[in-house]
Image (cartoon, grey):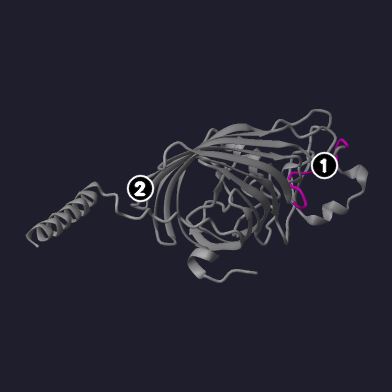
Amino acid sequence: MRFKSLAVAAATVAALSGTAFAADLGVAKAPAAPPPPPALGFDYAFGIGVMSDYVFRGVSQSDGKPSATGYAELQYKINPNIQFYARGQMWKINQPSNPFAEVDLIPGVRFTYGDFAVDFGAQYYLYPGNKDRYWTDSATFTFQNPSFAALPFGARCPFVGGFCATTPKDPSYWELFVKPSYNITPELNVGATVYYAPNWLNYKTKALYTSLTAKYTFGETGFAISGEWGYMNLHSLKAGTDFNPFFATPVKLPKYTTWNVGASYTWNQFTLDLRYHGSTLNKNGCYMASADPSGNAPGQIPSLRSNWCGHRFAASLNIDLVGSKDVGFLPK
């Protein structure tokens, strides 16, 4: 009996010792469950924003005044790497043709592979409700009168002595774009953009905008800094069109560099952005790139100068929401 008791005690000690040893090695824990796969199918996003100045590629679209915007986007993810989307965004603006607003219509595709992403598609800049159009009599005096559009063909450019338009009747136009980006680290993202317009602002000329971007996010603090360096290449106005008062000679439009740098803070769905914009455009180049009415005053010889460009500071506050994350209701 004593031998049996000793044997049982020894076995018990051995069993307890083995359990403790295994626990010390940490091999008794079950493996962690893998993260759930990304949701497929439909999703949506929407938001609104206000800003002290709507600056686009170095040119104020709101005459240096406050602006507002709102957008909605429908998304469809066919697999974890490919998402189709359709986006509509409206902006409050102040432009020569005096439209009701700027409405951006954007169909596109987003592709991701690891830390690499690319967004490509098309963007239509729609300017509904245009009210005004500006003309010159052989580039001497300016007129603001839509009835000039009804003048006989021989009384208008490209004929010598005819009235020449300095703004299109409708500046709406298309651009094609591609925007690749790469996460160098979880905090640092770099990218590039290419936008091509076959008929920029309906001036019957081409435009190409390219830029480099960078953004650094400070972990989970909500703070980030970002910047963009871009180059705008506007092709010349063709000879023999409504927009060319020199008839036989193409009119050169500016080619310029633009940049912005700023800091932002995001809290939940709110983002505050403080940004400084600049460009190489002088006042004359700014007018050529914008047709600012202040450089084209009716009844006066055009000054051909604009204050819509130049270095300026802009602040914005945006609210952005995603259906699956912030709302919970998704389309079927």
Query: Which percent across, then down, holds residue 318?
Result: 47, 59
Query: Which percent across, then down, holds residue 44?
Result: 59, 63
Image label count: 2
Q: Is residue 5 left or right of residue 253?
A: left
Q: Hey, which quadrant is residue 217 in on the image?
A: top left
Q: Is residue 195 left or right of residue 2?
A: right
Residue 219: numbered disc? 2
Sequence-wise first label, 1 or 2: 2
For the residue pair 28 and 90, the one nearer the viewer reads as 28
Label 1 residue SS? loop
Residue 308: numbered disc? none
Residue on which the image places disc 1: 242
Residues packed near mark 1 inside 10 Å, few (<14), some (14 to 19) or many (20 plus): many
Most distant residue in the front direction? 1
Of circles 1 and 2, the one toward us is 2
Query: Which percent across, then down, holds residue 158?
Result: 86, 37
Most frequent secondary structure within the magenta stretch: loop
Confirm whether residue 281 shows in the render: no
Q: Is residue 160 magenta?
A: yes
Q: Which corner quadrant holds the N terminus?
A: bottom left
Q: Which span is picked out in magenta?
A: 159-170
Residue at the image point whose x is 44% and y is 46% from the top: 275
For the residue pair 281 and 88, the one nearer the viewer reads as 88
Answer above or below: position of 81 versus 158: below
Gap between marks 1 and 2 measured at Cα: 54 Å
**What kind of residue is marked 2?**
Gly
Answer above or below: position of 43 versus 202: below
